[in-house]
Image (tube, rainbow, N blue to C red):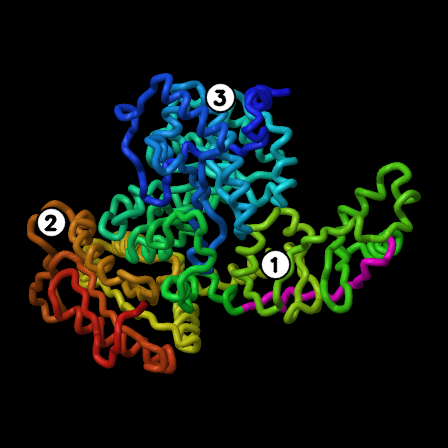
Amino acid sequence: MDDFTTTVARNPDVHPDKFDHPTDRTRGDSMRVASPQAGIDLSESAHAHLCDIVQNRQLSALFQPIIDLHEAKIIGFEGLIRGPVSSPLHSPLSLFEAARSCGMITEVEYLSRWIVLASFARLKLSGKVFLNISPDVLQHGAKSGETLQYIKELGLHPHQVIIEITESTPTLDYPLMRDATRHYRGMGFEIAIDDLGEGFSGLRLWSELRPNYVKIDKHFIQGMNRDAVKLQFVRSIQEIANKASARIIAEGIETHDDLMVVRDLGIAYGQGYYIARPDAEPVQELSPELVQSLKRNELPRAGLLQQRTTVEKLLRIVPTVTPSACNEEVFQLFENDSNLYSVPVVLEGRPVGLISRYTMIDGFARPFRRELYGRRQCVMMMDPHPLIVEKTTNLRELSEIILQNEPHHLAAGFIIVENGRYVGIGSGHDLLRLVTQMQIDAARYANPLTLLPGNVPIYEQIDSLLQTETPFVACYCDLDHFKAYNDVYGYKKGDEVIQETARHLQQLCGPYDFLGHIGGDDFIVLFQSEHWEGRCRALLSSLGEVFRKFYNDADRQRGGIETEDRQGERRFHPIISLSMGAVLIQPRQFHTHHEVASAATLAKKEAKKTPGNSLFIERRGYHGPIK
C-alpha cells in the first residue's frame, strides 16, 4: 500500500482514488483571491473544521467550459473546487492554505479529486475534464494504482482526463515532476501546464514536461489588442507551441475584443467569463451569438487548396469484412496484398471498426497465436474506435482532426463515409503526399525575394473569397519614393527595404489574413480578422524609424535624398513611406478579382495623395463592419 493509500485508509470517508485536483486558483475564470494567510485561523478549531469538511465531504465542484475557438464548440471543462458556502474556507486559496498549514493537504487533495470526477460523471459532461495537480502532493509521490479502477467505476476513461500542472511553486523538484508526468502519461492521461507567464519557471516546465496543452496566464490575454508587447509574447508562445505539437489555451477571456484577438492569432482553445462563468451545472452549448462571432466563413492565410480539396481525393477502395469474419480470413487479405495497410469492418453498410496490418501481423507472429485465434471472430483484432470522416471534409480539417487524436490513426488510416455509410478508406501517407505536392505547387508561384504568394495565388484567394461570399478588406500597399532610393542606393539595398516591409506586413496579419507580393514594392493584404484598421495605423506609426535606418547619416539629417530627373533638374525625395489603400468588400459587391484589384488600386492612389505613411479607406457602397 503506497503513502497515498495509507493516508486515506485512516479516514474511511475519503475515497482512496481521488485525482490530483487543483489548489484551484480559478485561473481561467478571473476569480483570483488574495492570499488568505492573514485571515485564516490556524488554531485547533481550524484543524477540527478541516477534519469535519473532509469527513463529511463538504466540498463542491464547479466547472468552467473550455472551447475550441475555431470550431465554436466546447471541448471540455476545468474542474474547480469550493469549500462550504458559509465557511471561511469557501475560497480554494483559503482551503488549501489551511490544509497545508494543518498537515492535511493530501486528504483535501484526494477529496477534491473525488468530488470533481464524480460530479463530472454525474452531470454526464462531454469532452475532457482538466484537473490540477498540487505540487505539495506531487512531492509526496504519485503512485495511484487504484485511480484507474475508480475512473472505470465512474464510466470515465483516462483519455477524458487532462492532468494540469501549475508552475506556482518555484521550489518544485523537476526530476520528480518529470517522473510523475511520465507516470500519468503511462496511464493514458494528457498533460497541461497552467498559468504560463505567471512565474519565471514556466518555459523550463514546458521544456522538461513537453505538455499536450499550455495555458497562457490571463495577464497576457486581457487587453492584448491594445498592448503590442503582450501581443508579441502570445505570438511567440503560439509559434513555440506549433513546433512543440502543443495546444494553447487562453485564460481569462473577459471581453469580445479579447476573444476576437485570441481567435485571430490562431490560438486553439479559450476560457473565461465572456465565454461562460464556472457553475455547478455548467452550460453545455455555446450561445448562438458567441457561435456566430467565432464561426465566420474564413479561409486561412496558408493552405487555400487544402481548404478546397476534400478527403474524397484520398479515397481508396479496399476489401471489407463483417464482424463475423474470422481472423484467418483477414490475415489472408493482408498476405495476398502487400499494399493493404488496413481492413475496414463493416456491418450493414456502416463502419464498426478497423483492423490494421500491424495489429494483425504482430498478433499472429507470437507462438501459437494463429492456431489459437485464427478461427475466432475478427472483432478481437479490430480498433472499435477508428477515425471516421465524411468525404466532404477538407484536407485542412482532416489534418486538424488527426493532430487532435491518437498518433496511431496516422499509420492505421481513416474510414471515409457519406452520410454515415461506408465508402472507402484513406491513409496518412496519401494525405502527407498530397499536402506536400500542394505546398510545392504553391511555392512555384511565390515571389523569389520575399517567398510570399505571387499573383496567381493572390487571384485565387480573392476569387475564392468572392465565391464563398465572405466579407473581407482588400488593402493595397505601395512604397513611396522607392524608385529614387533604388537609383541612389542600389538594388541590393532596395531589396533589403522590400524584405523589411514584407516582414512588418507579415506581423500585421492574423492567421485568417492573406499577404501577397504583387511584385516590386507592391503588396496586397486580404484582411478577414477584426481590428485590422487599428493594426494598420499602429504599423504606419512605427515605420518612420524603420525606413530611416536604410539611409546614411547625411540623408537622415536632410530628411531624404536629391536626384536628377531626365531634364537635368534636381529633385528632392523624402524618406521612404508606405501608402495603404483599403476597400471594404461585402458579399456580391464584386464578382472577379479584376474588379477587386481595380478598386484597391484606386484606393491606393488616394492614399498616396497624403504625404508620409498613410491609410485611405474606401467606404463608398459599404453597409456595415466586417464581423
User: Which residue ends up furthest to the right in the rendered image?
Assistant: 371
Assess whether mark 1 and mark 2 are in contact (beta carbons under 8 angstroms): no
Look at mark 3 in the image and give the residue it sits on. 139
Marks 2 and 1 sit apart, C-alpha to C-alpha, by 53 Å
- Label 3 crowd bin: few (<14), some (14–19), many (20+), radius 10 Å: few
Asked if residue 476 lies left or right of residue 154, the reply is left
Answer above or below: position of 551 versus 175: below
Residue 176, how many percent across, how many down? 51, 23
Residue 157 seen in render: yes
Q: Magenta part mainly helix, strand or loop?
A: loop
Q: Quadrant of residue 204?
A: top left
Residue 393, how many percent across, how many down? 57, 66
Residue at (18% x, 63% y) in the render: 480
Look at mark 1 in the image and give the residue it sits on. 431
- Name which of mark 2 and mark 3 comes first in the sequence: 3
Looking at the rendered structure, the secondary structure element under dot 3 is: loop
Look at mark 2 in the image and give the residue it sits on. 556
Q: Give the range drawn in magenta.
A: 309-326
